[in-house]
Image (cartoon, rainbow, N blue to C red):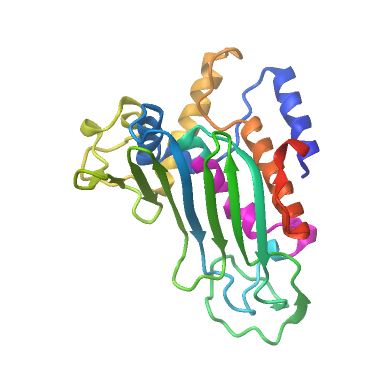
Amino acid sequence: MTARESAELVELARQSGQVAAVSYNLRYYPLVREARERIAAGTLGRVHAVHGTYLQDWLLYNTDWNWRLDPSQGGELRAVADIGTHWLDVVTYATGLKVTQVLADFSTIHPVRFRPRGLVSTFADAGTDRTEGEEVATATEDQASILLCLSNGAIGTLLVSQVSPGHKNRLSFEIDGGEGSLAWTSQDPNSLWLGHRKVPNQVVDKDPSLLSAAARNLCSYPGGHQEGYLDTFRQFFASVYASVARNDPSAPRDFPTFEDSHREMVTCEALLESSKTGRWVDLEHF
C-alpha cells in the first residue's frame, strides 16, 4: 500500500461514517496512557527530545527467513514498516506531537540469505542450519538509524533492528522535557520511570488506585497483578466496539484510526526517500 492509497481509505471511511480502526495496540498499555496524561498535564514541561529503540533478534542469522524478507510480499521497507511504525505511533500518541521531518540511514547486514525449500514458522527454530536452502539477495533493511523533527521543534532519535542479539521484542522510549523526563519499555510494561533534576527519581508501578483516570480505565486487574500484551488488544477492541455501539460518527474516537495509519504511511515513504538520498525529507511533500 502507498500513502496515496491510504489517503483514499481515509476518505472512504469519512464518507461512509463507519468505524474504521487500525490495531496500534501498544497505546493500550496503562502506563503508556499514563505517560500521555502526564505529558498533556505539563508535568514534563515543554518536550524537547524523544529517543528510543525497537529491537528484535529473530532475523539475526542469514539462515533466518520470513515472508517479510520478500519485497513482493512485504514491500520495500521491512524493519521500519514492521516495527518502527509501532514505535512512532506510541511516541507521537504519548507526546501529542507529529513527525514533520526525517533523516534515515538503512543497513542490510545480510545481503544474501538462505530461503528454505519448505515451510518455516515465524520466530521459530532459532539458529537452525538452513544453508541447504536457496540463496536470495536481500533488498530490505535489517536495521535503521533515524533522526526526527517533531511539530513543536523537538528532536528525536530511533534505532530499529531485527538483528540485535538477545532482544526478542523490546520497544523502549524516553521523553525529555524542561521539567522532567519519563521512560517506558515493553519488556517491563507495568513500570514507568520518572526523571527529575532536583528531587529523587521515581518509578510508578501499575496500580489503578495511583494512576490517572484515563490510565485507570485501561487496567483490568488490581495493583500487583500484571497487565500484558494480550490485554492491550482487549482494551483496543473494547474501545472500537464502544464506538460502534454509540453509532455516532461525530463522537470523538479515542482509538487509532485510518488517519493515524495514513500518517504512518507518509512517514514510511519519507523515510524510504531519505534513505536513498541521504537528505532530510519534509513530510509535507507527500
Query: Residue 133's quadrant in the figure?
Result: bottom right
Looking at this view, is 278 or 21 the one in front?
A: 278
Does residue 233 appear in this view? no
For the C terminus, the image quarter is top right
For the N terminus, the image quarter is top right
Query: Is residue 47 magenta-colored?
Result: no
Q: State the image coordinates of residue 9 (x, y, percent, origin top left).
A: 74, 31
Looking at this view, is 18 or 39 the one in front?
A: 39
Q: Is residue 233 above or below residue 250?
A: below
**Majority secondary structure in the magenta region:** helix
Does residue 64 appear in this view? yes
Which residue is pictured at 59% across the width and 67% down the height? 121
Looking at this view, is 279 or 22 the one in front?
A: 279
Query: Residue 58's quadrant in the figure?
Result: bottom right
Q: State the image coordinates of residue 253 (x, y, percent, origin top left).
A: 54, 22
Q: State the image coordinates of residue 122 (x, y, percent, origin top left).
A: 58, 65
Q: State the image coordinates of residue 285 (x, y, percent, origin top left).
A: 77, 38
Q: Magenta residues?
A: 70-91
Is 243 placed left or right of 117 in the picture? Answer: left
